[in-house]
Amino acid sequence: MVKTILDELIEANEFLLPGNTACPGCGSTLALRYVLKALGKNTVLVIPASCSSVYQAIYPKVSFKVITYNVAFASAAALASGVKQALVKKGYDNVNVAVWGGDGGLIDIGAATVSGAAERNEDIFVFVYDNEAYMNTGIQRSGSTPPGARTTTTPLGKIVGFKKPMSFLMLLHGVPYVATASIAYPTDLYEKVKRAKDVKGFKFIHIFSPCPPGWRFDDSKTIEVARLAVETGYWILWEGGYRDGKINLTLSPPSRPYKDPSKRKPLEEFLKYQGRFRGFDERSLKKLRDWIEYQWNFINSFT
Amino acid sequence: MSEIPDNHLILPISKPTKGAGGKTGSWRVFRPVILEDKCIKCMMCWMYCPEAAIEAHSRNEVPKINYDYCKGCLVCKEVCPVSAIKSEREGE
Amino acid sequence: METYDVITGNDAVAWGARLSRVEVIAAYPITPQTTIVEKLAEWVDKGEIDARYIAVESEHSAMSAAMGASAAGARAFTATSSQGFLYMFEMISWAAGARTPVVMAVVNRALGPPWNIWSEHTDALMARDTGWIQFWASNNQEALDSIIQAYRVAEDKKVILPAMVMLGGFVLSHTAMPVRIHDQDKVDQYLPPYSPPHYVLNPKLSEPFAYGNILFPWDYAKVRLSIQRAMENSVDVIKKAAREFQEIFGIWHGDLIKEAYTDNAEMLIFALGAVAEQAEATAELLRKKGYKVGVVKVRVTRPFPKHEIAKLANKVSRIIVIDRDISFGWDGILAGEIKATLHEHNVDTPVTTKIMGIGGDDILPDHIEKAVKEVYNK
């Protein structure tokens, strides 16, 4: 029998242990399963304040089977830089040093630190699981919250601001590897992390990770919501990076059909499951469509 | 109160443990049940379990749900392409 | 080979880091610290020292990178001043809790606004409660030597806490003085390579673990209390480190304190760093004029040398504390610490605070003499 990617995934060790303290239906733990399957045991995770600092469970136990270092909110990418540089100095060149955090920690408060590490092209991974708000503190808006979404600090829906296009910003830093991924496509995520492992330098992987309590949808719908984000063109899967004076970008297979707007499902399909978009008005809808348009235009300019 | 320790290097170091957050199966309201006769061993339920609470060792076996830890989110039921997972209310 | 040179305090600090064989340097510029990391950059680029140099984008990141490097088993160094110190404050506290024995030079500078780049001690004194060991250098030789001693203390298995070494902005940082640059072999003998006894972020050396996930209050309290125990242990470790330094290098900067002219003194001046050095010079003059004045350089402010200070204070009838710093709404910061110490030890010697040299105003022997005479003749 030919060994498929699924066989490989089944064989790969599980580094997320069951019986953690994540919410039922958590997108982030699912993403972490595949990130760690791809990275393996030879990994140091650096985790800023986030849901992951809580769902790894409580001392003296932990639900992750790799070295895990819990650090202050805005420090993660710089701290990981120090870890990596020290390991290289000590002669351990091949350890995966990976920041694992949410959009609050890595797109808002820690964004400058991520940018600094990217500019220095530190040989680290930065994984953002993007659930589009500060979920651990109880659903407050972040720079990654989309227009129109209700959070406890945008009770009428996010009116001020867009969604910070962090993966584009990373790409423009000229780092060698940037990718987006989604928990609806675990093999795509797994393979991207595997490819990133072969890249020396800064690797940024931005993972779309729906949050049932934060987005107000049923626990069982996590995958469906994530898939609809891709099928409506709201979240686009791609990978790219800088090489030889040029930024390369390719659409990943799950997103390829949606380059053609007529193939995309109506945006309302994505919105309808989510309580955070309840009372969504035309203005917000327009802003969200503009955001989608902007993303595709940006991506199409490279492809 | 236990005794105040006299150690200068007490570290907040935790060890990897299954069930670090307890027997999270007790959170469950609905229990997913795999119908073995319907299962096509596509492994989708295993693949999408956010808890890593579905065990699979090869594609020749029907995956097994670890009810000690399954939180009952029912993602597995949603992603099953052949409706081989049903849900039952706990305690009924 | 031992050499002598006339160098600034900042170059002396850089030499201290170089001789300590630092392995990772995190660098961010701020006046008057900048020339420390510039000197180190020059040496790294020329291949004179074998260290990884991370030019980070902020002081917050400088401390993050330094403590990350330390946690992965390397000897890490950084340096800052004033606003930079405050900007990294979160990570200063974190580095102590993470038990990463980073050494940092703090070139003391006044805080804004208004902008002021000159010497004042308020910056570093704000970190008294973070769990860092605090050394104060009173001259450039001491700046160099204190960096080496700081690593020795910080990395001691009975301690494992970060340490900061303070030197006055411009007064020391940019003032050249004769400094002995020690023989590397002797420094190696004094300071062995860092070998973390507690944990290391290296999957090749360690089985998986997590550091610092959530603890409930009682466990948390035990962890934090152990920092206090380490501080208590550090008292003897600092004394031993100073003694052995003297044995190997023949230089005595004091241990937690350094006394000058304290024999049969009727009055003591307490001060930090270069201010204490100036006080010592003034005391020499005053002694010639018949004033029985001694000086106690408080060389370490954490752990605070309570027993040593109380013992000396008990023998005199008056104390003056010169503070180049202030805790608004309270007192000079060192004076406040000394008053509390004397109370704890039932010493009732009156203490007078003199706040001088705020924002870098020169503290000249005349100023100290005037302050001393006011109290002495009371």
Image: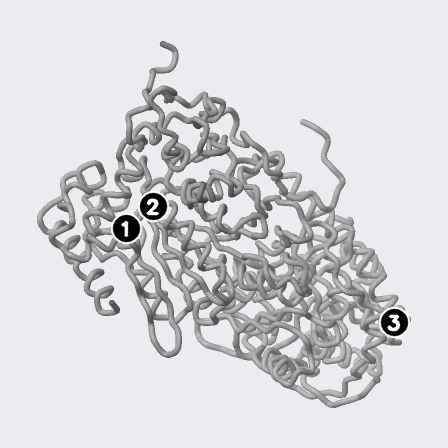
Q: Which residue is mark 2?
A: A185
Q: Residue furthest top?
A: B92
Sort mark 1 into few (<14), some (14-19) or many (20+) by Cα contacts within 10 Å: some
Identify which residue is drawn at 52% across, 76% down. Answer: C30
Residue bearing the label numbered 1 = A254
Proximity of marks 3 and 2: CB atoms separated by less than 8 Å: no
Is residue C305 shown left or right of residue C162?
Answer: right
Q: Chain of mark 2?
A: A
The crowd level at tag 3 (other Cα within 10 Å; few <14, some 14-19, many 20+) is some
The chain holding disc 1 is A
Furthest residue to the bottom? Answer: C6
Name the foreground residue: C34 vs A67.
Answer: A67
Q: Residue at x 91, y 71 (%)?
A: C247
User: How many residues crowd around disc 2 within 10 Å: few (fewer than 14), some, or many (20 or more)?
Assistant: some
Q: Position of residue B83 (x, y in %)?
A: 28, 25
Q: Residue A153, percent across and down?
A: 27, 45
Q: Residue at x 23, y 40 (%)?
A: A276
Depth check: give the residue in front, A290 or A145: A290
Query: Which of A280/A7 is in front?
Result: A7
**Residue behind mark 3:** C246
* Secondary structure state at the residue bearing disc 2: loop
